[in-house]
Every structure is written in C-alpha cells, then in structure tokens.
Amino acid sequence: MLEVDHVDLHYGAAIALRQVSLTAEVGAVTCLMGRNGVGKTSLLRAIVGAHPISAGKITWEGENISKLALYDRARRGIAWVPQGRDIFPLLTVKENLETGFAVLPRGQRKVPDEIYDLFPILKTMLRRRGGDLSGGQQQQLAIARALVMKPRLLVLDEPTEGIQPSIIKDIGRVIALLRSRGEMAILLVEQYFDFANELAQTIVVLDRGDVVLSGRREELDEQDVRRRLSV
C-alpha cells in the first residue's frame, strides 16, 4: 500500500501541508477531497515526486520513496494523471499513448488491446493530434496513457473537471473496473461528492493543509463532508 506519514510541504516560506497522513490500499479507491487551494494537488505532487516534502515520510510497497525522483517512482509503478491532463497537443493519440513506454522494459512496449476496450473512442482517433480532441477525450487519453505504464498506484487529480456528464460516467466505470480487479491502489482527488462517494472506500478531507476528516466512507457523516466542501 501507499503510506503518507505526517508529511509537511512548503513552497518557500509558505506551508502547504501540515502533518498529513493517509493510506491507499491495493484494490480500493481513496478519495482526497476539499475546497480549492487547500493542498490536494500539493499532496499528489509530493506522492509522485514532483515536489519535495519538508518533513515526514512516504512509503510505497514497504520502501521509503520520499527522496526518489519522479521518474524513479514511475518505474516503481506510480502513474500520475495531473489536473489539466497535460497531454502532448502536437503528438497523435497513438504517440501520446506510447510515451507511457518510457518506464517499461523493451519487451513490454506495446499498447494493450484492453486500453481500447476501456476507451473505444481512442481507437478511432489514433492518428489525430491530441490537441484536436475535446476535453473529455483528452481526459480519457491521459488516463489511458497512465494505464499503458501498467501502474500499481494510479493517482488521478480531478478527472471530472470540465468534462461532459456522459464521459464522467465512462470514467467512473473505468475506475470501478480497475478497483474491482484488486491489482492497483487508486488515489483520486475529486470535487464532486456524489462521484467520489460512489467509488471510494476511504475519504480524506483537507482544509488549509490539514486533514480534518478521514475514514471509511460509510463511517463518515455525509452532511459533514458536504459542508467542508462548500464554499
């Protein structure tokens, strides 16, 4: 599993996270929630290695990865789908998917057919440039690219942001399917309570860099969670 243990994170003199702890287990979805600007993306950046932590420890599969570079964490099976998707707009869909090969041995550098089963629209658009896709299609491409890496930890930063409802449902079905296989841990940052509540086994709520609620979904008071998400 992933274990985040009393992590602090700073941007210069400003503190973004204070003593944050959470776990994400294989075969489950852990959902990180909170208002805008409370430190959710900062925590994901700390986990994947995009920003150093100031204190605490991050452990993945029993190994302390706190000081490992982003690419070393990717090689250990950690895949990140950042907010805003960050696909390569001038590369084709096929070329975007193939960027996931970077962490794989040469013998495994093939886009699995299952990717097109999960996201059939991508199979029809392999020669189109990523920048020509709609926002929802780009989000599907970003998740598919992460799955090409064969991750054991999938980190998703607000995959429903700015996406049409039909594709939100498709993404939800994919996350549920991946969870049901019991082969990876999924850490999801999400603003929409209903989407998170349907998928997550554990919910963690941040406020101003602190964990203010944490527990199994069924143990938390729904109204309390919703109140902490409202502006």
Image (spheres, rainbow, N blue to C red):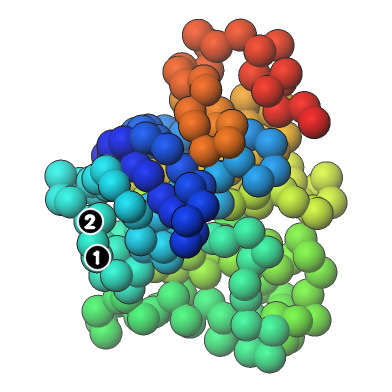
Residue at image x 24%, y 45%?
57
Q: Is residue 91 left or right of residue 136?
A: left
**Residue nearer the viewer, 147 or 47:** 47
Residue at image x 50%, y 8%?
219
How would you rate the neighbour count of disc 1 (Cα within 10 Å): few for under 14, some for 14-19, many for 20 or more? some
User: Which residue is the extreme one toward the front?
Assistant: 13
**Residue nearer the viewer, 124 or 103:** 103
Disc 1 target residue? 68
Residue type pointed to by label 2: Ile
Label 1's element?
Answer: loop
- Where does the image place residue 31, in percent across and percent down from the top left? 53, 34
How would you rate the neighbour count of disc 2 (Cα within 10 Å): few for under 14, some for 14-19, many for 20 or more? some
Say whether marks 1 and 2 touch (CB < 8 Å). yes
> Which of the numbered marks, if any, corresponds to residue 3?
none
Q: Which image quarter holds the C terminus?
A: top right
Rendered view: 108 above or below 209: below
Q: Is residue 97 left or right of residue 134?
A: left
- Where does the image place residue 184, in percent across and percent down from the top left? 36, 45
Q: CA distance from mark 1 to mark 2?
A: 5 Å
Rendered view: 204 above or below 63: above
Q: Is residue 3 left or right of residue 28?
A: left
> Which of the numbered marks, if any, corresponds to residue 65?
2
Residue type pointed to by label 1: Leu
Total tally of numbered discs in the picture: 2
Residue at image x 51%, y 47%?
16
Rendered view: 130 above or below 161: below
Q: Is residue 31 visible?
A: no
Q: Is residue 192 visible?
A: yes
Residue at image x 35%, y 69%?
70
- Where does the image place residue 15, in percent across and percent down from the top left? 48, 48
- Where does the image place residue 108, in percent across and percent down from the top left? 30, 76
Label 2's element?
Answer: loop
